[in-house]
Image (spheres, rainbow, N blue to C red):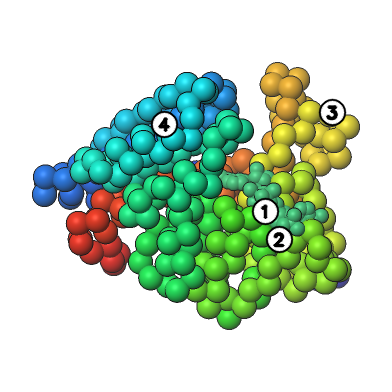
């Protein structure tokens, strides 16, 4: 029988700490030049999950020495009023990054707002100008989750150039920009989605498999090439004890989490597939852990780019 070596767990929390420490040092260097990078976060209404995300973004800013300002307009705010708010932030010199926490209330025109953010302050990397910059390999601001994936691969010394990378999912936030960054790093990239015929044929050929689907444990063990690098972007909450047992058989810790919190988090890759991997990102503690660190990095990058300071890293 073929002997399998134990897969390497790619620890997103440790990588995120490393990045945050580097960002803090970059902030200090800017502060010595009289520049304090600043992030404005707009949180509309009272969506509990958004409140949690925003609070942790603001807290991380504080830890790294980044100035942050939270704006909390009421749910009833109109698109016109939001546009005025964004325009004020675009004009402020002490603000380098503007983040509009999504989702916005239904009556607000999200697309129009995201396009109103100055591309130079678009720390989420969603503005069409930054999408274009990413595609043409120009310096700019890239979306945080895909940027986090690339940092995991780079800092774990996993090869990308010449590898077959398969991205399942084609969202503007994760799938497409991840594919673009992988191709910029010289991988051979295939993008799959819900209309892909014979998905397993593609995933089985992947040296690097990125799953950004939003369906619990969707990628099964037989869909994975032995020894592949598995990047699991999915964050899915399961609430049924039979599902928890199916994904995590005999896992007392997760059964306890379910009893205590009413849900357990599982990625888009079935945990059984991880045993076949060469390396994989766990859920939680993998890709998700990088997102805020990359937002902080983007804020500092924006502060530098806007002032013509080099963003080259050694
Ligand atoms: P979207 O719902 O926007 O996109 C999902 C993609 O998966 C679509 O392109 C869809 O295809 C594809 N898909 C759905 N079903 C299938 C299927 N049966 N076979 C193949 N492809 C399929 O999700 P996001 O990209 O925003 O997020 C994906 C996951 O990542 C979610 O679990 C989300 O919670 C998580 N996430 C995690 C982040 C983090 O770690 N910080 C950040 C953002 C997201 P089609 O286009 O044809 O519909």
Tell me the CA gap for discs 1 and 4. 34 Å
Whether residues under marks 1 and 2 lie with C-beta atoms below 8 angstroms apart, the answer is yes
- In the rendered view, tell whether residue 165 sits above or below residue 89: below
Q: For disc 2, does the CB lie below 8 Å from ligand 1?
A: yes
Q: Residues within 10 Å of mark 4 (few under 14, many from 20)?
A: few
- In the rendered view, tell whether residue 165 sits above or below residue 121: below
**Residue 234 seen in this snapshot:** no
Q: Nearer the viewer, residue 152 or 4?
A: 152
First reached walking from the N terminus: tag 4 or tag 3: 4
Whether residues under marks 4 and 3 lie with C-beta atoms below 8 angstroms apart, the answer is no
Judging by the rendered image, the residue that carries numbered circle 3 is 241
Judging by the rendered image, the residue that carries numbered circle 2 is 168
Q: Nearer the viewer, residue 210 or 79?
A: 79
Tell me the CA gap for discs 4 and 3. 45 Å
First reached walking from the N terminus: tag 1 or tag 2: 2
Mark 3 residue element: helix
């Amino acid at each position: 029988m073929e002997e399998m070596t134990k897969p390497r767990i790619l620890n997103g929390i440790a990588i995120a700490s490393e990045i945050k420490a580097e960002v803090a040092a970059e902030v200090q260097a800017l502060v010595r030049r009289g520049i304090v990078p600043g992030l404005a976060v707009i949180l509309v209404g009272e969506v509990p999950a958004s409140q949690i995300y925003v609070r942790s973004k603001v807290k991380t800013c504080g830890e790294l020495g980044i100035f942050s300002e939270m704006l909390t307009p009421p749910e009833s705010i109109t698109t016109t009023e939001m546009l005025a708010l964004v325009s004020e932030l675009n004009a402020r010199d002490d603000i380098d990054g503007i983040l509009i926490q999504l989702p916005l209330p239904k009556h607000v025109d999200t697309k129009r707002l995201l396009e109103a953010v100055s591309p130079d302050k678009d720390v989420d990397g969603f503005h069409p100008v930054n999408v274009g910059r990413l595609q043409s390999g120009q310096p700019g601001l890239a979306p945080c989750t895909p940027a986090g994936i690339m940092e995991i691969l780079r800092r774990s010394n996993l090869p990308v150039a010449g590898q077959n990378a398969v991205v399942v999912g084609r969202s503007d936030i994760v799938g497409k920009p991840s594919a673009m960054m992988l191709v910029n790093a010289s991988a051979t990239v295939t993008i799959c989605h819900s209309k892909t015929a014979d998905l397993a044929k593609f995933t089985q050929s992947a040296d690097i498999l990125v799953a950004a689907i939003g369906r619990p444990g969707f990628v099964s063990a037989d869909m994975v090439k032995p020894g592949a690098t598995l990047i699991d972007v999915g964050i899915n909450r399961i609430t049924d004890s039979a599902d928890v047992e199916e994904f995590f058989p005999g896992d007392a810790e997760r059964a306890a989490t379910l009893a205590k919190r009413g849900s357990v988090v599982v990625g888009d890759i079935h945990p059984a597939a991880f045993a076949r991997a060469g390396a994989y990102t766990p859920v939680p503690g993998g890709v998700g852990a990088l997102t805020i660190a990359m937002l902080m990095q983007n804020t500092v990058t924006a502060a530098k780019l806007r002032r013509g300071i080099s963003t080259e890293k050694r």
